[in-house]
Image (cartoon, grey):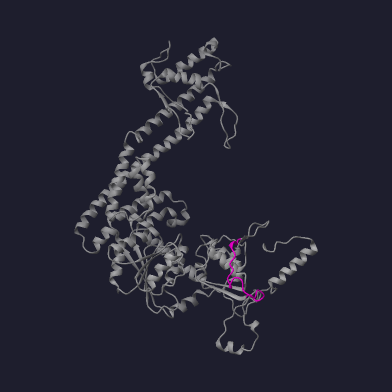
Amino acid sequence: ARFCVQSPRGPCSFDGWVYTSKLHMPQHPQQPFRRLVLDEVQDLIEDGTEAQKNLVQLSRQCGNVWLMSATPFPHGNRSVTANHELLGFKRLKLDVEDAGRLGAWHPFEKIKAKLYVRSPQSVADEAVEATASVTKQTIDIAPRPVEKTFYNIAYGKATQLVTNRQNGEWDHSYFSCRQLTVHPEASADLRQQLASNRNSASSAFASSSSSSVNRVGRYASVDSFARQSLNAARSRLRELQSSACIPRQVEEVKYTSKSLQLAEKVKTHRANAPRAANPFAATGNADASDTAAMEREAEMIHDYFCTCCRSDGPYSCSRADRNAVIRLIRERNAFGQPIGPEFIKGDCNAVIEHFATGYCRVAATMDEDGDRSTSIGALDHYISVTRRTLDAKKKALEDMEKEASDLEAQIDALAKSTAESREARAKARGSDNVAAAHGSKSAALIQYLEEHDIKDRHIVFSMWHDTLRLVQLTLQRNGIESVFCHGSNDNMQSAIDKFTTGKVNVILLSARAKASGANLQAASHVIFLDPPGEHADHGATLERQAVGRAVRIGQKKPVTVTRFCVEDTLEAKLWGEIDRASKRISKRDDDQSYVIAEGKDKSLARQVTIETADDVQAHKGEEEEEEEDIELGDTTTEEDRIKRRMEEARKNGTVVDLADD
């Protein structure tokens, strides 16, 4: 069966199948389950999924619901909403995705004080340290010349495009810089630039190449990617410098500017020497004053293009024809494309005729809402449109010239660095060869893996999926088997099973993957290829959660946590900010705000105490109802509450939607 509850306040969040198992529909509805405990709830539910709907229905059959998780909100607002659904708040949706700490006034902070129980951080740390030994280290990596060149290019662009300077180098504009510290091809921006430079001359190729931009691993080595980027940059620069791009744009800016100047000159001339009252009259019917005005305007237009002082008409000469130009306002077809030529050039009489017949009428314009507004003169309309067109053409020219300048700098830098890399590769041996082929950081990872016992298991974290795909290809090409934990839940679980059972000793995991609660105690090494997170606090949280996959209660082996950091990049600064944020979070999490113990605030709705074995023996004879030390406030059963509402509805003559409640 399926059902969806509708009400004046909107549909109920539950819209789907009604589950009819013994768990969901017990044989004795008068005696529901006393308690539902869901462990690692972050991997069980996500707002809107079938798993969540299944558990929501199950939770309604239980007297109490407990959600257990070390990472309760991996999906941000969606996790909060899903958790609150299970706790009984059907429409409680809060925005908790804030870059900083939520204030004490925030509803979520008040709810946490009532509903959430958490051990202080020091208690959790002591429990872990009692069973696990953790060593932390940072490996500094020197980039190769080609990698440094790519980084400098990306960093310069990011600095110009930064959107939120308060975030510093955590801003999304710097994501490309952070990606290419592992491998230049990992940067989606560099792949996009390479594809656009290569295919800019053909829009058909450009559209077909857009799908290939998302693929990584297409190049045999870093140097190969650099050579392709260099060749594509040279090709794009030649295209910009060809007659079809920058020279043509310069010409169009010149012609549009002359057209605007002439139109403004004609407007001033007409204001000083107004035409006849009936400008729509046929030429043969025009009176003498109108004809004289038209002749004076034609003479003025001729003088704008030529200084031969011709005064006996027709107002055209070889010099005037050579300089004559006027931009046209073109009509557009059904697809919005302009029809006909943009300029009239080489015929002064044609320009004079265009002003005489085209720009003496009234043109209707549209307001911002598409409604017809007050009509204006056709010449004023032409001046307005031409001025906007001139600004757009100047901006396009500036962009082309800047792109050409950037490409020249990139070509010089890439040509120099690729030559240096070619010479260094000819002399390279061992790990230097791996660095030349796969990048310095990948070479450092391979060296790290080979230096340790073959039976040791390693978790390799990165912020970026593309980075991990390239790392997996690199490991495969160097004879190291690994699994990439991503995709569907089944694929992720399969990867985790292969790792925990020892079939492979290296697992690649995104710091933002849904397997945040996975138990990977089999690992003795945790490696971070790059600083995780979108800001310092987020990065510190992700790092703690990632390390927590291996460093947890029950871990018997010593664990080494290793950070990779490329020298002379933003990584050192980001790691430093993560360290400072981690200290702030540890201090904040070590408070007693959510620890409910005897003697604390008695006004809270529920009390939670931890009993010793002696306490349990002393209370053995107490009634079963006293076993659970939880007070819910309202102990009325669901059936009694429904009866009470129905009785009130009958008395008041109202209609009650019980399902909505």
Residue nearest the observer in this picture, 460 or 2? 2
Which corner quadrant of the image does residue 545 belong to?
Answer: bottom left
Left or right relative to 88: residue 580: left
Q: Position of residue 123 (x, y in %)?
A: 50, 77
Q: Position of residue 389 (x, y in %)?
A: 46, 33
Q: Residue furthest right?
A: 651
Up-down: is 396 above or below 188?
A: above
Q: Is residue 105 visible?
A: no
Left or right relative to 284: residue 416: left
Q: Position of residue 76 (x, y in %)?
A: 52, 62
- The residue shown at (47%, 53%) is 164
Residue nearest the observer in this picture, 26 or 70? 26
- The residue shown at (27%, 64%) is 478
- The residue shown at (39%, 38%) is 398
Is residue 30 shown in magenta?
Answer: yes
Type of secondary structure dominating the magenta stretch: loop
- The residue shown at (36%, 39%) is 401
Q: Quadrant of the N terminus?
A: bottom right
Q: Position of residue 442 (x, y in %)?
A: 31, 62
Q: Quadrant of the C terminus?
A: bottom right
Is residue 31 shown in magenta?
Answer: yes
The residues colored magenta run 13-32
Up-down: is 371 above or below 608?
A: above
Q: Is residue 362 visible?
A: yes
Which corner quadrant of the image does residue 611 belong to?
Answer: bottom right
Which corner quadrant of the image does residue 3 belong to?
Answer: bottom right
